[in-house]
Amino acid sequence: MNKIIAVCMLALFTGLLVFGQEGNAQNGEKLFKANCAACHALDKKLTGPALKGIVTTLSAEGADKEWVHKWIMNNEALRKSGDKRANKIFEEYNRTAMDVFEGRLSDKDIDDILAYTENPPAPEEPKEQQAVTATQDDSSNSIYIFVSFASIGIILLFTLYKVNQLVQLKTKGIVLNELQATRIKSLSQFYNKYKGFSYFLITLLLALSLYGVWAWLMGIGVDKGYEPEQPIYFSHRIHAGENKIDCQLCHSGAKYGKVSEIPSLSVCMNCHRNISEYTGKYIEPGKSKEFYTSEIKKIYQHIGWDEDKQAYTGKQIPVKWERIHNMPDFVYFNHSQHVVAGEKTIIADYNKKHPNQPIDVVCKACHGAIDTMNVVKMANDFTMGWCLDCHRTTEVDMNNGYNAAYFNKLHEKLKKEYGEDKSKITVDAIGGLECGKCHY
Ligand code: HEC
Ligand code: HEC
Ligand code: HEC
Ligand code: HEC
Ligand code: HEC
Ligand code: HEC
């Protein structure tokens, strides 16, 4: 029995240890996905060679880790320096230029990436939801849980050990010598004296760990501030802000239905066929014109556009944008209801509540000032409470054709009952709080 308990505790410990740990390879995986996965896979050739075990492979060919670092930092400079290997691989890949990562990655980042390519973790079942909802705060909570469980575990193990010792003495029929007898006596005195305290301690630790679990559960699905890196450094600030491009030029789905959609690369090409270099005045601290230009070239690599010949090659690699906003499957949210039918009243209600930061575009009521963000960040909780709050305070626009036709009778009735100015209809009055409206 004791052994079983001990084994269980051990398993719990190791589980928690693994859970709480974040190694280099893990960070490397993130960096790899954000920076390299557009052109490299681990085990097959894409635009560039397969990278699994690349350090081992290259060192067998006489190129050490330092060479790999130099290559990744700035392959262009390495090639220009006359390095034979660098020029050979460049020719082998039809002179396709790899990105320059100087200023974007540190040496430590590269070490992390290489740790990942040397020892990639075994592929898991994809856990999309978790990957999306994992936020930084999780780690502090898991430390809570870990420390509390660990302390309880240590106390339990110690007690088990002591009890076990006693039982063994008893079963072997060994008569306690004086020293042992006094020890046991003092132990039981000690126990009696501090019983209250130890109960208190265990209760406190249990409460702490329960709090940790609770806080962690509450955090699931609340991703305010979630701001992943994207495979192409696409800046909303530069497009929607500096160049004042209309949100719906790219997110054209918003007015027709449920999803806003991420634009396809052919939408990008409408402009970037001609805009192949960045010449704008705005440059984010830490970035450069060359950097922006290299990001524009990524569009060409992905869609298969040969700039020299000004023609499509037919070779396409889809861009894997990281999804940021993602409601659970059981929620029905429809953009057009908000962007078309609700547009006027949502803007009016928002501006009444935020007189200092009025908005002109309805999207900003929910997504925040996207046109100032270089990297999209979730601006709100996107929880049920958040939806309901707005439905309780925002009026329904009785002047739009749809509502006028459907709710005219209700409006007339309310007008009669409450008088003209008290007849304001907020979204909750037309069913905006009904479970079935938002849940399948
Ligand atoms: C835009 C596409 C692109 C991106 C992004 C990219 N690479 Fe490459 N990479 C290439 C190509 C193409 C080659 C082959 C050599 C050449 O044509 O320059 C290459 C070659 C390499 C090599 C040399 C392999 C050899 O056998 O010598 C290494 C190492 C490498 N890449 C690592 C990385 C890492 C790490 C990242 C991310 C930090 C990355 N690459 C991002 C396209 C890319
Ligand atoms: C030139 C095209 C373009 C314009 C204009 C544009 N976007 Fe985007 N938007 C994108 C692309 C590409 C992505 C995916 C990459 C990213 O997240 O940055 C995106 C992502 C988003 C996302 C996050 C999607 C997700 O994954 O949940 C939101 C929200 C968004 N845009 C809102 C807006 C708003 C609001 C405006 C106007 C102020 C706007 N966009 C203007 C192209 C555009
Ligand atoms: C309506 C025209 C238009 C569309 C559509 C468009 N862009 Fe741009 N893009 C621009 C302009 C203008 C600039 C700034 C160029 C300058 O100032 O020299 C730019 C700059 C960029 C840059 C460099 C700055 C930055 O944001 O990092 C990238 C990368 C880029 N675009 C990617 C994309 C992608 C990806 C898409 C498709 C999802 C896209 N663009 C769609 C007009 C457009
Ligand atoms: C009433 C709040 C609200 C308004 C207004 C709104 N959105 Fe959204 N947006 C959401 C929610 C909620 C989601 C998540 C939807 C999901 O996961 O099903 C979302 C998701 C998105 C996405 C990710 C892709 C998708 O459709 O799931 C993009 C892009 C986006 N919105 C752009 C826009 C643009 C552009 C506008 C303005 C034209 C806009 N949104 C107006 C609440 C809003
Ligand atoms: C910024 C305010 C705002 C937020 C936030 C908001 N809504 Fe709405 N919603 C409205 C308005 C205004 C309408 C009424 C549109 C109309 O005139 O038909 C509406 C209507 C609806 C309707 C149709 C109701 C009916 O009876 O026809 C649904 C369903 C809905 N919203 C779902 C959601 C969900 C799900 C969320 C959260 C993810 C959400 N809304 C967040 C403002 C908001
Ligand atoms: C205006 C839209 C809206 C209405 C009305 C609504 N819900 Fe929700 N509900 C949501 C959204 C959005 C989520 C997802 C929240 C998240 O992911 O954090 C949600 C989540 C839930 C969940 C999952 C638990 C959670 O918090 O994540 C339950 C259970 C639920 N709703 C029950 C109900 C019931 C019961 C009603 C009717 C009394 C109702 N909802 C009405 C939008 C709505």
Image (cartoon, rainbow, N blue to C red):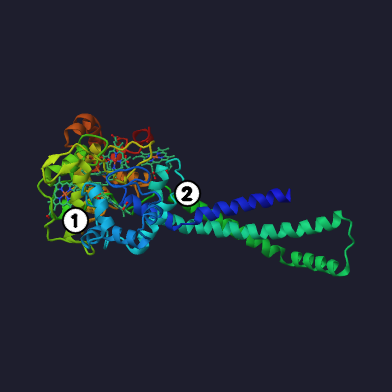
Give the left or right position of residue 263, taking residue 206 as reference.
left
Q: Position of residue 223 (x, y in %)?
A: 37, 50
Mark closest to the chain's N terminus, 2 or 1: 2
Q: Position of residue 325 (x, y in %)?
A: 32, 45
Q: Position of residue 38 (x, y in %)?
A: 28, 47
Q: CA distance from mark 2 to mark 1?
A: 39 Å
Give the left or right position of residue 160, taking residue 234 as reference.
right
Seen from the viewer's position, the closer of residues 272 and 420 is 272
Say if disc 1 is inside 8 Å of ligand 3: yes
- Relative to residue 361, is residue 162 depicted above or below? below
Q: Secondary structure at mark 2?
A: helix
Query: Quick one: label 2, few (<14), some, or many (20+) residues within 10 Å?
Result: few
Give the left or right position of residue 256, taking residue 136 as reference.
left
- Amino acid residing under circle 1: Tyr
- Relative to residue 421, is residue 14 depicted above or below? below
Q: Mark 1 sits on what residue?
A: 292
Q: Mark 2 sits on what residue?
A: 217
Q: Quadrant of residue 170?
A: bottom right
